[in-house]
């Protein structure tokens, strides 16, 4: 199933995408819902971030191609991104005027289905609603200089996500890609994740209760590309779609 969150006629709704249309749900996909007969053309609605996460857990250094000769982690390297930093498809990524470099990082994002804690790896996938595209926007100079990554990874607009949540892909065998102005910067299979999704869910849930709508950004491969004023960044994942966002320098 392919879920969307969208704005139509001044109302925000969740829906199920079928072809070029979206059918409204009677409730969110994290609840018991029915598919109604109220539908719109996708071209007639504004797609929003596919959910509003209570929290975002992000994973660093989870592809060997991103390590740059550093030793690999012995356990998942987890950090927080703020929910207020989430934006949706076609929303603008604001490049702060006092950062020297702003990078795009394509990531497969796991969306948690229900409240859970201390999840065994064997049961982890049963707590997943689906997957979406994410861009872990990163201000590199702040990331190097600050004691932690609070502004480098969580400034306003630094967590684009979308366009849909999809539940019928193999999350360990899809390609994640970044294009900036049509030029491909990153392209790698999730088969090369160092810590797979059951491991990440089990590890994170040892320490914090996971809640419906929580997002886990699973890490980025290779060498990210810089985003400058006027650029268009596209994050594409097989079976999910393309998350496109323009970049604008802070005024």
Image (cartoon, rainbow, N blue to C red):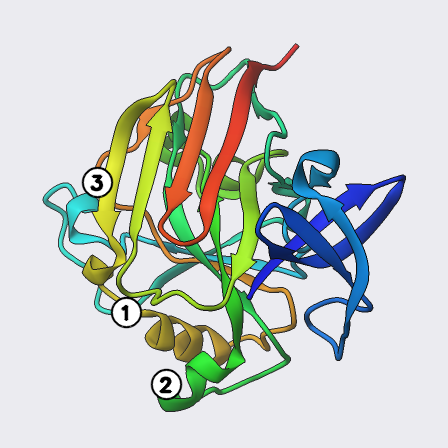
Q: Residues within 10 Å of mark 1 (few under 14, many from 20)?
A: few
What residue appears at the point 80 percent right and 68 percent down from the top-left corner? Answer: 27
The answer to which quarter of the image holds residue 180 is top left
In this view, 40 is above or below 113: above
Q: Upstream in the sequence, badge 1 or badge 2?
A: 1
Residue at (41% x, 80% y) in the render: 202
* Outermost residue toward the right in this view: 10
The numbered mark at residue 75 is 1
| Mark whose residue sits in front, 1 or 2 | 2
Q: Quadrant of residue 251?
A: top right
For mark 2, what is the residue? 121
Secondary structure under tag 2 reads helix
Up/down of 242 relative to 39, above or below: above
Expressed as whole percent of the image width and height from the top left, the position of residue 225 reads: 31, 26
Q: Secondary structure at mark 3?
A: loop
- Residue 91, how many percent across, how many down? 63, 30
Viewer-side label of 1, 3: 3
Kindly check if marks 1 and 3 are in contact, taking CB atoms under 8 A apart as contact: no
N-terminal of the pair, mark 1 or mark 3, is: 1
Q: For the N terminus, which image quadrant? A: bottom right
Asked whether, in this view, residue 163 is left or right of residue 34, the answer is left
- Residue closest to the far left: 69
Disc 2 crowd rating (10 Å Cα; few below 14, some 14-19, many 20+) is some
Q: Which residue is mark 3?
A: 222
How far apart are the alpha carbons under marks 3 and 2?
27 Å
């Amino acid at each position: 199933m392919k879920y969307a969150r969208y704005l139509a006629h001044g109302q925000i709704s969740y829906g199920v995408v079928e072809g070029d249309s979206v059918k409204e749900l009677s409730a969110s996909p994290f609840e018991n819902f029915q598919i109604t007969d109220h539908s719109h053309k996708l071209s007639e609605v504004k797609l929003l971030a596919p959910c509003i996460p209570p929290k975002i857990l992000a994973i660093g250094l989870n592809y060997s191609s991103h390590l740059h000769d550093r030793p690999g982690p012995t356990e998942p390297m987890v950090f927080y991104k703020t929910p207020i930093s989430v934006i949706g498809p076609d929303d603008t990524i604001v490049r702060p005027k006092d950062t020297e470099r702003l990078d795009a990082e394509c990531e497969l994002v796991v969306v948690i289905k229900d409240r859970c804690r201390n999840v065994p790896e064997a049961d982890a996938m049963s707590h997943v609603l689906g997957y979406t595209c994410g861009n872990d926007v990163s201000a590199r100079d702040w990331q190097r200089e600050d004691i932690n990554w609070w502004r480098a990874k969580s400034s306003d607009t630094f967590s684009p996500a979308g366009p849909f949540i999809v539940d019928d892909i193999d999350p360990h065998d899809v390609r994640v890609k970044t294009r900036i102005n049509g030029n491909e910067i990153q392209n790698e299979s999730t088969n090369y994740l160092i810590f797979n999704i059951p491991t990440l869910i089990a590890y994170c849930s040892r320490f914090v209760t996971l809640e419906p709508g929580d997002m886990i950004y699973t890490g980025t491969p290779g060498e990210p590309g810089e985003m400058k004023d006027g650029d268009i960044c596209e994050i594409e994942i097989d079976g999910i779609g393309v998350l496109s966002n323009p970049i604008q320098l802070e005024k």
